[in-house]
Amino acid sequence: MKERGSASAVVLILILFLSALFLTASLSLELSLRQLRRSEERDARRRRLVAEAQRTLRILLEDPTPLVDCPQDPVWGARPQESGCTVELEDLSSRLGLNWVRKELLESLGALKPGSSAQELQQFREDTGIHLNLEPAFSEFFSAEDLNALFTAYGYFNVNIGDELALRKLHFVRGGDLAAAEEFHAAIQRLRIEKKIVEPAEMERRIGTGTYLLLYPVLNAEPAMNLHFVPAAILRGLFRHFRVPVEKAESILAARSSTEFTASDLEELFGKEVYEQTPLRHYLGVRTWFWQVQVRCGEDSLRWVIARLPGTDEPARLRLLEERFSP
């Protein structure tokens, strides 16, 4: 009897053990299935976000005037159809690039904090290099409001208007050769002394094939900002800096929400002498180089940063630089 009782106990314990194993396996399987379903649902939501972002870019690329970006383009009137999503498009590059802006222009804008100087900012860039995040790097020089409103880290360097020390730093960051960077700096200084404006088609010849291949397209000779989207304070500041009558700036600001300015309009807008003899047309053009596409569908969101490669290719060549899903 004792043996029989012991055997029964063993069998009972074994059954309980196997039941526990089965229950654990069942729970594990259920959890795995739930995770799989959540993953599938998340992927479906992300595909929905990406589809809306791609749709926006298709409309942007199908613009009937591809060499001009302006508020009259079809993309600004585009709305998702019964998708329940909202899409926002923002020009990221039509502000002054704080990694390259020249100290003379900074001084004339009057945006620096009291006690800070453009010379100190230039030296700060020389010491610390290129910054992809403006805050907190430049917070000691500008208020948070001015940093966001007037400056950007998204944008190309223009050989005609970039601070010469910033261009030298760019060369060193890209190539790692201090002597070659100094030679490039000397070439830029010669161009500035001779008051030579480098056009896009002659850039390789002007700076040398080796330097061109190293730095292009980060460095190019295309206008840095879009006249249609540049902040009013920068437009007025640039016109004041290059001694263009302020009435011209006010005329552009009043008309640009309903007028598509083309590259051929710039000479008349700026004045022939200013257009030919100053680099103003390298600050202000009619194309946007960096876009942000923000899609929101319920609690889900997607942020894309898109770069347009320099040149006159039709359709434009776009590259995805950043992608961020939330949550």
Image: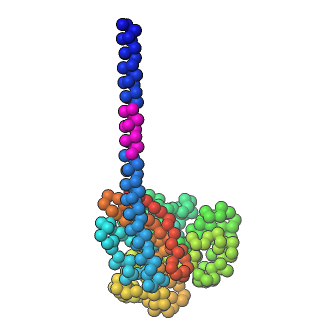
Which percent across, then down, holds residue 96? Answer: 46, 72
Q: For residue 216, which quarter of the picture?
A: bottom right
Q: Is residue 197 left or right of residue 85?
A: right
Q: Quadrant of the C terminus?
A: bottom left
State the count of labels: 0
What is the magenta range? 22-33
The one nearer the camera, 319 or 205, is 319
Which percent across, then down, holds residue 310? Answer: 55, 76
Residue at image coords 36%, 24%: 16
Residue 2 in view here: yes
Which percent across, then down, holds residue 4? Answer: 38, 11
Residue at image coords 44%, 89%: 269
Residue 155 in view here: no
Which percent across, then down, holds residue 256? Answer: 37, 84
Q: What secondary structure is the magenta-colored segment mainly?
A: helix
Q: Is residue 275 magenta?
A: no
Q: Quadrant of the N terminus?
A: top left
The one nearer the camera, 134 or 141, is 134
Residue at image coords 40%, 86%: 260
Judge whether 226 appears above or below 7 on screen.
below
Judge whether 281 appears above or below 216 on screen.
below
